[in-house]
Image (tube, helix red, strand yellow):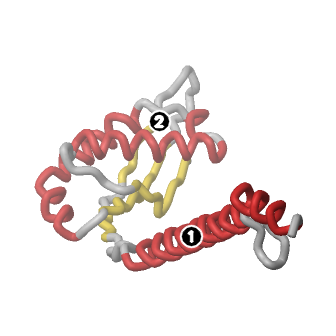
Amino acid sequence: MASKPKAAAAAPEGEQTKAGLPLKKIIIAAVGVVVLGGGGFGAFKFFSSGHETHEAAAPVVKPAVFVDLPEVLVNLSNTGSDRTQYLKVKVVLELPDQALMAQITPVMPRVLDAFQTYLRELRPTDLDGSSGLYRLKEELTRRVNAAIAPNKVSAVLFKEIVVQ
């Protein structure tokens, strides 16, 4: 009979189960499993739903519109050389949509004037290498955008460049 009072005294403290584990440890383990399982499920739903919205929200890509400009022929700036050099350029403007084409057409003389005045100031050394052509393309894009503001072209593309 002495063993019963000792077991009764130990029971309120840890409340032993039949397997011998304290009930508090089992409850803490169960809560931990539920928290980790809920966190894993939440992460799965977050990442899988985010992936689906990216594919559903993908914008429809509109085809680009291209506008051919007339050929431009200018003499390059002469820096003391007796020989005159010429630059012949064929350019295409890339527009983001068809509606912009109707807005650019009336101001095309302004665009060509911006090209002429800039190209006449170039020296043959300004066009050396790919970096020279890249700078030329960037400057022409900037000048076209200034001429047609507030509208903007996507890019200025070269069809032909000849330095003679």
Place of residue 52 in the rendered image (x, y in percent of width and height, measured from the top left)? 46, 78
Question: Residue at point 50% right, 69% down?
Answer: 46
Place of residue 113 in the rendered image (x, y in percent of width and height, measured from the top left)? 25, 41
Residue at the limit of the structure toward the front, as seen here: 1
**Which amino acid does the dot numbered 2 rest on?**
Leu
Quadrant housing residue 39: bottom right
Residue at the limit of the structure toward the top, as seen here: 80
Looking at the rendering, in which quadrant would you find the N terminus?
A: bottom right
Place of residue 126 in the rendered image (x, y in percent of width and height, measured from the top left)? 56, 34
SS for tag 1? Answer: helix
Label placed on residue 76: 2
**Quick check: 155 above or below 78?**
below
Q: From where the camera sits, is residue 15 visible?
A: yes
Residue that mark 1 sits on: 38
Q: Nearer the viewer, residue 132 or 113?
A: 132
Crowdedness of circle 1 by 10 Å Cα count: few (<14), some, many (20+)?
Answer: few
Quadrant housing residue 63: bottom left
Q: Nearer the viewer, residue 163 or 101?
A: 101
Question: Residue at point 62% right, 72% down?
Answer: 37
**Quick check: 21 above or below 125?**
below
User: Can you tell which of label 1 and label 2 is closer to the viewer?
Assistant: 1
SS for tag 2? Answer: loop
**Which amino acid does the dot numbered 1 rest on?**
Gly
Crowdedness of circle 2 by 10 Å Cα count: few (<14), some, many (20+)?
Answer: some
